[in-house]
Image (tube, rainbow, N blue to C red):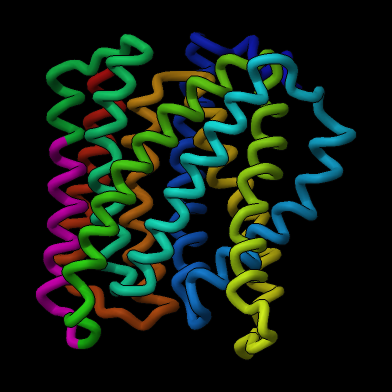
Amino acid sequence: MSEWLVSLEGTEAGHQLALVLALSAAFLHAVFGALQKGRFDPWLSRASIDACLVVISLPVALFLVPWPEGNAWWLMAGAVVIHLIYKVLIAMAYTLGAYTVVYPVMRGTGPLFTVIGAYLIFGEVFTIVQWLGVFTLVAGIFGLAAYNFFRLDSGRDTLIPALWFAVCTGLFVAIYTTYDAYAIRALPDPFTFIAWFFLLTSIDFPLLMLWRYRKGDWPDVRGLMGRSVMGAFIAYGSFGAVMLATRLDKVGEAAVLRETSAVFAAFIGWIFLKETVGPRRIGLMALIALGAVIVEMGG
């Protein structure tokens, strides 16, 4: 499968597959965010999901894919550091702010930084039409966040620091997207990076939670394990899909398309978290989708 995937790089078939992967990653990432923001502490939720990722990834990394060699270990180490910072920032944002406010902000800042990073590192150039699509999508995302912000009734006292954490998270979304794209392209087998990535970047939060509750004062975690197993498989689909998309096609385009996750997140917040969705929010979500279409059509 690895050889077949690599053979699609730079082809029209590869472009189409990257499009499907990026949009799939968008939906799955919104689901993943909702799972982490649910009724459990976001820190504990992430640690439980990561523990499941370690269990799932260990046999895959050890027995099903080639082992990393040489410089690949340094690339893995960089990914561990970057994603640890990202996970801390996103946990802080979810702890302090409402999901439908902070999620669009962290996803809205990501595309701009990623497109710039893709230009500096990979030499990718967006057309004027594609830039119009980027600004349309980002305007819709930030409009959605602003609308949710002004209609929020509870938790407003901690919302400003939550938004700052969300902006910083967006910056690290761009950093990890660009870095992971560079790393997965540097390894001959893309699945080697994905398997070892999930194994090595999922050890930190479980250890952090073991230290946090070292005195044994664990909260009620009934029902958490089922959500965590689901979250682990969703993480594989979300992060793995966008990594493969950046291997097959432009990093910037994959990053922009993935940010349609804000649309999916709004629907999830409405259906499962019982957050209000009205005609204005539907219009803003349509603007996000329009921006993604412009980026794709303008390439």
Rendered residue at 67%/84% (across/down): 215
Question: Where is residue 38 drawn, in percent x and y?
Answer: 48, 76
Judged by its main secondary structure, the magenta piece is helix
Left or right of residue 33: residue 253:
left
Q: Is residue 217 above or below residue 71?
A: below
Question: Where is residue 171 drawn, in percent x and y?
Answer: 29, 42
- Is residue 280 found inside the magenta-colored segment of the image? no
Q: Is residue 89 above or below residue 67?
A: below
Q: Quadrant of residue 55?
A: bottom right
Furthest toward the front, the residue is 215
Left or right of residue 137: residue 120:
right
In the foreground, 234 or 200:
200
- Is residue 147 found inside the magenta-colored segment of the image? yes
Rendered residue at 39%/41% (across/down): 258
Rendered residue at 86%/43% (across/down): 59
Indicate the quadrant containing the C terminus: top left, top right, bottom left or bottom right: top left
Numbered range of the magenta stretch: 135-153
Marks counted in the figure total: 0
In the foreground, 263 or 142:
142
Rendered residue at 30%/24% (across/down): 117
In the foreground, 8 or 255:
255
Question: Where is residue 225 drawn, in percent x and y?
Answer: 70, 74
Q: Quadrant of residue 232?
A: bottom right
Q: Is residue 168 above or below residue 9?
A: below
In the foreground, 59 or 74:
74
Left or right of residue 122: residue 50:
right
Indicate the quadrant containing the N terminus: top left, top right, bottom left or bottom right: top right
